[in-house]
Amino acid sequence: MSNPEISKKSEELKMSASVEKIEKPEEENPEALKAKVRLLQGQLTEALNVIGYLENEVENYKEMAVNDKLTGLKNRRAFEEELMRVAKEIHFGRAYPERRQKFYIKDAALIFLDIDNFKKVNDTYGHLSGDKVLQEVAAILKQHTRDTDFTGRWGGEEMVVMLLGAGEKEGAQKAEELRNALMAKEILVKDSEILRVTASFGVAAFGEEISGDPEMWVEFADRALYEAKRTGKNRVYTFNQIMEEKLEQFH
């Protein structure tokens, strides 16, 4: 008959050996460890590539959300966001001059332009030529405005420029500059034919009456554009010009 103390000791030694075996696994072959490291490095590189791809896709989608694909100008959504931002900043600067920052937007002018007889261009030369005209007009807008200004496509053949720090007078001068640049532009269209196009322009500055309703600013510029087209096209009209002409009718 075995001694209980000896049996107990024997069991403890067995358990100790088992624990030691668990705590100290057999060392792997160095080549196997290197292979595992290479595998992990490859997986990490692949994961980083996927992350980089996804980040680029996010940036692309952001660009698509605010840019017009055909012309490279900002789209209507981007313009509406910029309109609200600029209107808010001008209004704040005028309402609280003592609190305004060192740099702020004091004035701004909107220029709306519509390519004259654009439907005829599409009907005569085809939609690809019409697209080419839109791209050339967009290029002129970019060439004749600053990086701080906003240039966008409102829709169809209508485009918009927002001149920061400009009043209606400066806006009208810039619109006239754009009108002349467009008239001088030779656009190569279907069958190597050279086409010249014109545009009508409407200008409105940010006035006191607009402070609470930025959409009114757009309406004023659009009304000036309509008047430019109504009175013969290929010309610049300002909103104040409309108001002055109405006043003259009452005298």
Image (cartoon, rainbow, N blue to C red):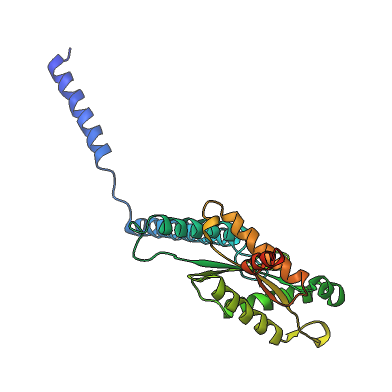
Residue 5 in the image: x percent, y percent? Answer: 13, 17
Residue 114 in the image: x percent, y percent? Answer: 71, 70
Q: Quadrant of residue 66?
A: bottom right
Work out whether residue 15 or residue 214 is closer to the camera in this orientation and state it. 214
With 134 as the anchor, is 109 left or right in this view?
left
Regarding residue 3, the answer to whether it shows in the image is: no
Work out whether residue 246 or residue 61 is closer to the camera in this orientation and state it. 246
For the point 78% across and 75% down, the residue is 232
With 116 as the anchor, is 16 left or right in this view?
left
For the point 72% across and 71% down, the residue is 228
For the point 24% across and 33% down, the residue is 19
The N terminus, quarter of image: top left
Indicate whether 76 appears above or below 23: below
The C terminus, quarter of image: bottom right
With 29 as the anchor, is 215 left or right in this view?
right
Number of marks in the image? 0
In the displayed image of the protein, which residue is found farthest to the front? 251
Indicate whether 98 appears above or below 133: above
Q: Quadrant of residue 3?
A: top left
In the displayed image of the protein, which residue is found farthest to the right? 124
Residue 116 in the image: x percent, y percent? Answer: 77, 74
Work out whether residue 49 or residue 35 is closer to the camera in this orientation and state it. 49
Residue 115 in the image: x percent, y percent? Answer: 73, 73
